[in-house]
Amino acid sequence: MPRTFRTADYASTLKLTVSLEEAVPPNHLARFIVDVVAQLDLAPLYARYGERGGEAIAPEILLGLLFYGYATGVFSSRKLEKATYESLPFRYVAGDLHPDHDTLAHFRKTFLSELKELFVQVLVLAQAAGVLKLGNLSLDGTKIHADASKSKAVSYQRLLELDRQLRAEVDQLFARGEQAEQSDTQAGLVIPDEIALRQERLTQLAQAKAILEARAQARYEAEQAEYQAKVQAREEKARKTKRKPRGKAPKPPTPGPRAKDQYNFTDPESRIMKNSTDAGFDQHYNAQAAVEQGSFLIVANGLSNQPNDKAEALPTLDALAPELGQPAAAALDNGFFSAANITGMEARGIEPYIATGREPSPDLAGVGGGTAGAAAGRRLAGNQDGLQTSDGCGSRDLSPAQMHRGAGHWPY
């Protein structure tokens, strides 16, 4: 007997009446967003609107669209506008209104500082509802591509070469100017304009050089602090064991810019960083997020142009809103491992759980009143408060040795 199939009657389907109440059930995220926005204090937003003008779309509608877009991965204002026509949850959040992309983009740009405060209000509401219980955090970072091309970047060594080249050209142009005055001919060359052009370029190179030197100084100070901590730990270990420490002594950092340090003229604040997805390098920013492990809510974030994550742990933790309270512990991968982060987290009352890589560093012994392994690998008591990992056989607490050697997998 031949098999039968269900077919669709598209002409009848087009005539169906769809109820948003059915399409967006009570437990749907869109309903949650609308309910949360209704509880926020939007007085600062309303205060920014003028008394005159046409009928404006209420801030809570625009805010709800942005929040729901962020939660579902829709960030473009044009895509948000389109979604209010084509997506039923978006249509519900918009109240069957269709704000154009210019309105959405202008709202986001105008109220950017207020939006940051409203995100904190959302977290406070989640805390009051029992959804967020600030306990253990997980920190991690990602690279965000800058709107700049590597072809517009120049190294410090090349900056010096260009500086010498342009100065030589300026001297030559001054000499040609004197010759032109004597011979009363310009030979088709507007010498003052050419000199002004090169002097402008020299000014730009000087600015780039100053920025690279400032970055190099900041890097040197950070490396010097880490070097001194390693030396002190090494000396302390030798004093306690009364033996010469094994391995090579820490190498002191070298001050000043490096030949390959780069500056980008299109986006000077961006920097060359290793891509997160492959082994290549590009112009990036370094974005950080701190996630509460129980609720998976992002409770703090950060953005910088530091290529290395080591300098990002403490600023990200400091970005945590005071209204949310104090976390008990934080788990970080080995990209964050440093003596400064261990002591800094302990000074803030946050238990550091930082993977050290495949082998622990003998030079970090003695940090934070014990070994680095003890500081980075102390275990929180109890299943509820313990940091856990999953190895395919269910969840289990990480042992101190696994924490210290980075054998565990963090629950990001």
Image (cartoon, rainbow, N blue to C red):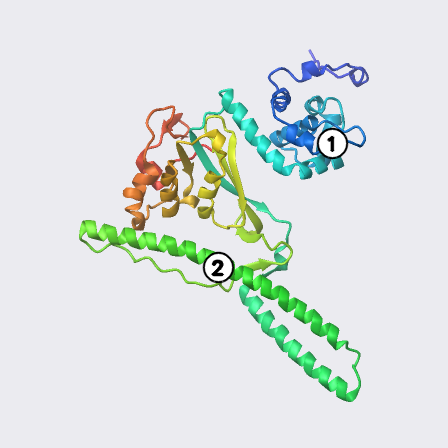
Determine the residue positioned at 74% across, 72% down.
Answer: 193
**Label 2 SS:** helix
* Residue 191 locus on image (x, y percent): 74, 77
In this view, 114 is above or below 220: above
In the figure, residue 74 lies in which quadrant?
top right
Q: Nearer the viewer, residue 380 or 207?
A: 207
Mark 1 element type? helix
Against 370, is 189 above or below?
A: below
Q: Earlier in the sequence, mark 1 or mark 2?
A: 1
Q: Residue at x 50, y 50 (%)?
A: 307
Q: Residues within 10 Å of mark 2 (few under 14, many from 20)?
A: some
User: On the rendered image, what quadrant is the N terminus found in?
Assistant: top right
> Relative to residue 336, is residue 169 drawn left or right?
right
Q: CA distance from mark 1 to mark 2?
A: 45 Å
The kind of residue tagged 2 is Ala
The answer, for residue 84, to whether it is visible in the render is yes
As drawn, 96 above or below 211: above
Residue found at the far bottom of this picture:
182
Residue 261 visible in the displayed image: no
Q: Nearer the viewer, residue 25 or 196?
A: 196
Q: In the image, what residue occupies the spot 36% across and 24% down? A: 383
Q: Are marks 1 and 2 in contact (CB under 8 Å)?
A: no
Residue type for callout 1: Glu
Residue 294: give x, y in percent of width and height.
46, 26
Q: Nearer the viewer, mark 1 or mark 2?
A: 2
Query: Furthest residue to the left?
Result: 242
Is 337 displayed left or right of 263 in the figure? left
| Residue where numbered disc 2 is placed | 216
User: Residue 390 location, x and y as percent?
Assistant: 41, 29
- The residue that label 1 is drawn on is 81
Residue 71, position as x, y percentages in the image: 60, 29
